[in-house]
Amino acid sequence: MDRAKRAADSRVSLAIITDPGQANSFGTLHGGVMLHLADECGAVAALRHAGGGRITTAAIDSMTFLGPVYVGERVELTAEVTYVGRTSLEARIEIFAEPLARAQRRMVALGYGLYVALDDEGHPRPVPPLLLETESDHRIAQAAKARQAVRLARRAEAAATDESAIP
């Protein structure tokens, strides 16, 4: 297995200028467009930590939309790995927007993506551990472990759901 890696080494950003094709009839960006961009940004952070290869999305959760994004604004996403299991990686994803006419950057969404590293056959593969150097790193890791426990419980509940019971 590879040596542990710092969270900062996985940090990535993605920026776009929004256009009318990404918006609803009110002139604001569709939430699905933001989720798509968040997934891409989080996956790249996970790929950086995993050392390349293949990644699949296991969950996008806790995505909280804090405000609208308007057509023509610059949207910037940042992601960084915050948790590493044996084969899975969590990335914290922040989304910011700012009008081009003035530098007033604001956070518009925050969430987490969970990704699984895959080998050439499409099976989960081990990833390097996350290096925890500071007290802040340890606090972030503890919160991430709690989110992972909730995700695992939610996954178990979904797997146990009887499809015939759904109307």
Image (cartoon, helix red, strand yellow):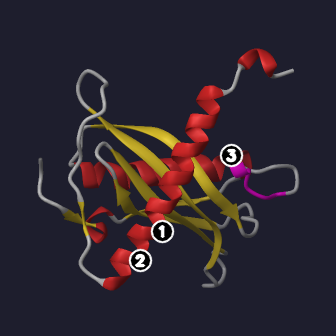
Task: Provide the residue designation for mark 1.
Answer: 143
- Identity of the residue drawn at 72% across and 64% down: 69
Precedes in sequence: disc 1 or disc 3 = 3
- Identity of the residue drawn at 33% across and 50% down: 85
Amino acid tagged 2: Arg
Precedes in sequence: disc 2 or disc 3 = 3
Task: Provide the residue designation for mark 3.
Answer: 32
Relative to 145, say whether 120 is above or below: above
Amino acid tagged 3: Gly
Is residue 38 in view? no
Question: What's the distance in space between the residues labelled 1 and 3, CA to CA?
Answer: 26 Å
Which numbered dot is residue 133? none
Relative to 133, say whether 37 is above or below: above
Q: Are marks 1 and 3 in contact (CB under 8 Å)?
A: no
Left/right of residue 8 with respect to residue 74 in the rendered view: left
Question: What's the distance in space between the residues labelled 1 and 2, CA to CA?
Answer: 6 Å
Q: Are marks 1 and 2 in contact (CB under 8 Å)?
A: yes
Q: Are marks 2 and 3 in contact (CB under 8 Å)?
A: no
Task: Provide the residue designation for mark 2.
Answer: 139
Q: Nearer the viewer, mark 2 or mark 3?
A: 2
- Identity of the residue drawn at 63% across and 27% down: 160
Amino acid tagged 1: Ala
